[in-house]
Each structure stands twice: as structure tokens, then as C-alpha cells.
Amino acid sequence: MSVDKTNYPPQKKTTNGCGSWSGTCTHFKPSRGLVALSVVVVIVIAATFVVWTNDFIRVRLNKNIGLENNTLSYRMWEKPPVSPIMAVYIFNYTNANEFQKGIDKKLKVQEVGPYVYREHAEKVNVVFNPNGTVSYQQKTSFSYVPELSAGHRPRQEYITVPNIPLLVSMTNRKNGILRNRVTMYTGKEDVQMLGVISRFNGEERLHHWSGKDCNRIDGTDGSLFPPNLVKRNSTIHVFSGEICRRFPLEYSEDIIAHGRFPALRFRAPRDVFANPDVNPENACYCHPDTETCPPSGIFNASPCAFGAPVMISFPHFYLGDPSLLQTVEGLKPDPQKHYGYLDLHEELGVPLDGKSRFQLNMMVRSSSTLRQLANFKDGSILPIAWFDVGIEGLPEEIMDLLYHVTFTTRHIQLAVQYVLLVMSIVLIYVLARSIRSRPTVTASSDVISPI
């Protein structure tokens, strides 16, 4: 017997809950606990990625290293806890009379010293400007340190030097408030500009030299540097108001300062005082009124010294032209004694150690009318004295602070990194096990539901 299906109502096929009309589907419905665990895993993995790809210690330091009134960094900048030591070595001309009489053809010098002084400095007349800079003057005083002066007593030693009043007046190493007013960036708005000088006596550039680059003042005063510039294979700059120029320092090597702290050592380029034929960048330091530049190893600072014939070099004419040693006898250049350096903390950009070593010289012009100058070769450069300024040591509280910044914070960062890494691995394992152990739900196929 046949069945007439035309009178039956239409039938409807429903899905099995997996999105298909037929077949068998196996699935599970995640619990709230599993969802929460998944969220935790994602958060921990993201945190692990962040701490392993970002130096959050340096980021935190950069946010707090800028100068701001009544902060620790400001107080240490305003009144530095470190008092540099300045050792002065004077050249005594032992045969001046014989040379003037023509008996001796060459002057002879004997190095006398050191006369050692402790420098005490502080920033005064400090004004914070609205453009992220601070203006100040330097107040300096010196105290004699007899125990480091090899028994010498100032004012009781008799020496013979060229007759010029430059030994003290032209070094800016004086007691009292210096007349120069410096404006520099605080680093609060941009840590990459920390300590960079923007104005010197209200001017954005110098006017002593013949070129734009030589008149730049955008170095630091040497007390701190932008941390981002303190890197290997980099060059930093110190601006010196005493000689009116920006002075470069190049990365030299990695060292351990004070036997404890990793640091980067910087030195002046060997050609920093070279003749323009050797270092073309020095061409703009040649005074336009002169036809020739001084020999290599000499920097003509006379435009900065009101026209006085002041010449700057490394001690004993180190790295200078050999002809400089032919003027006088008794000079013995030694890189260990006469080549300066600066050791900087890589993360803070602050000096840990250093030696600034420069020599004051005078250029002599021959004269047919002055009997005293008759025996001098025109353009002779005579050494007067050289200065060795450095840090004797760091106070214990500074050593402790540097230790925590250098090591303790790093240990904390490493601990956080590895703890998060282990947590990520464990949580991923727990999540995977939880997913595999969840019960499944099987839906049948061809489910028919009547209308």
C-alpha cells in the first residue's frame, strides 16, 4: 500500500550545535575558571615580553635623573659632594741669564711641584627657566693641601718664569663667583638634553672664531652628560669657558672604576690640537689676523684671553710637533702622566673618575728693540705651568648609591625577568593540561524537529 506524503506537513532539519546539518560533532564548553586562567596566561606572557625587551630600570632612571628643585639630583648638582684636587706644576727656567747673554743657545726648564689645592665649588644665583633650562654661576674656592704637595710651601719657593701675569689670571681657576653665567637644559622635558649648555653669558654661540662649528657651545660643563650619549664608539663634548671652545672626548675603552663599577673611558682625540693640515676641523680656530696656525699640539687661546699670547697644549707638549721640544730643554712627554681621561657611569652619565691635564704656554715674538727678546726665535712657545685636575675619590654615601644603581636594581630586574619567564612556562603547561582534560559533548546527526 502506498502512502500519500502530500498531506503531511513539511519537516525541518536542525543543526547539531556545531554549525552542520548532519554528522557527529564533538566540542566542549569552557568553564569560567578556564577563561580566567587563559586571561592570566596572556597577561603574564605580555608582561614577560615587556620586561625582556625593555630596560625598565634605565627608563625609570631617565625619568628621575633630570634636575628639579629640592630633589636629590639637584642638591648633588648644586653642591657636589666631591672636591676635585688640582695639582700645579711650574716650569722653572734655570739658565735665563745665560740665555739672555747669549752664553746658552737654548733655555733649560726644571719642573717644580706639585703644588696641590682642593677645589670647592657650588652653583649660585640659580634660576629655573620656563623653557626647561636652568641658569647659574659657579662659586669656587681653593684650599692648599700641604700633605700632597711634596713638602713645597707656596710663596717660599723662588722660581724664574717668563714675565707675564697669566699664571693665575688666565686659568679661570680663581676664588669667588665666576663672572660667566651658564644656561643648560635640566633634562626633565628631554633627558637626551640633560646638562647640555644652551647659552653662555646669554649668547647662543661664541664670536671668537672664524667658523660656525668652532663657535658652538652645545657641550656640557663636564659634571653630567645625557645618558643616551654615553655609549661605546661615541663622542661627547665638554664646553670650556676658560679657553672658549667645545672640547671633544672619544670613547676609548671599558674599565672598572674604583675597582667596583663598570664604566666607559673617554679621552681627547689625539689630533684635537693638530694643525689644520692634519685635522681640517681645526681650521676655524686659526685667528683670521694671522697668516699661519700654530704647530700641531698647540691651541691658540689668545682670542679668549683679550689678545694675550696664551697657548694651550697637553703637558710637556705631549702629542705636539717635535719642533716644540727644540725650544727648551727638560721636557719629557709621558702618556701615563700627561694624557687625560674621563670615566663615566654608562647608565647615569656621571663622572666616576678622571684627570684633566693641560699646559699653559706663552708665545714670544722676537724684537729688535727689546734686548730681553733679542735671542728668541720669532713665534717661540714657552711652557709656563701645567695643571692636573682630578677626583681623589668618591664619598662612601656616593659609592653606596652607585652600588645600588649599578648592581641591586639590576639584580631585581633579572629576578623579575626570570620569575615571569618561569611563570609563563608553568601557566602555559597548566592551561594546555586543562584544555586536554575537559569533558567533551557529542551531538547526534540528522536531528529532525517537527514544526
Image (cartoon, rainbow, N blue to C red):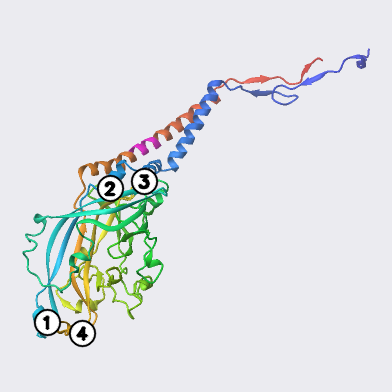
- What kind of element bears circle 3? loop
- What kind of element bears circle 1? helix
**Foreground residue among 4 and 158:** 158
- Label 1 with label 4: CB-CB less than 8 Å: no
Question: On residue 367, which mark appears?
Answer: 4
Q: Amino acid at mark 2?
A: Glu
Question: On residue 78, which mark appears?
Answer: 2
Q: Which residue is mark 3?
A: 66
Kindly report which numbered mark, 2 or 1, lies closer to the viewer in this rendering: 2
Q: Residue furthest top?
A: 1
Give the mark nearer the N terminus: 4 vs 3. 3
Say which quadrant the C terminus sits in. Answer: top right
Give the mark nearer the N terminus: 2 vs 4. 2
Question: On residue 99, which mark appears?
Answer: 1
Dot 1 surroundings within 10 Å: few (below 14), some, or many (20 or more)? Answer: some
Residue 327: % across, % down: 19, 79
Dot 3 surroundings within 10 Å: few (below 14), some, or many (20 or more)? Answer: many
Give the mark nearer the N terminus: 2 vs 1. 2
Q: Amino acid at mark 1?
A: Phe
Residue 430: % across, % down: 48, 27
Per the image, is 421 magenta?
Answer: no
Give the quarter of the image for residue 74: top left
Give the mark nearer the N terminus: 1 vs 4. 1
Magenta-colored span: 411-417
**Foreground residue among 32 and 252:** 252
Is residue 375 placed above or below 280 in the rendered structure? below
- Label 3 with label 1: CB-CB less than 8 Å: no
- What kind of element bears circle 2? helix
The Cα atoms of the two marked residues, 2 and 1, are separated by 50 Å
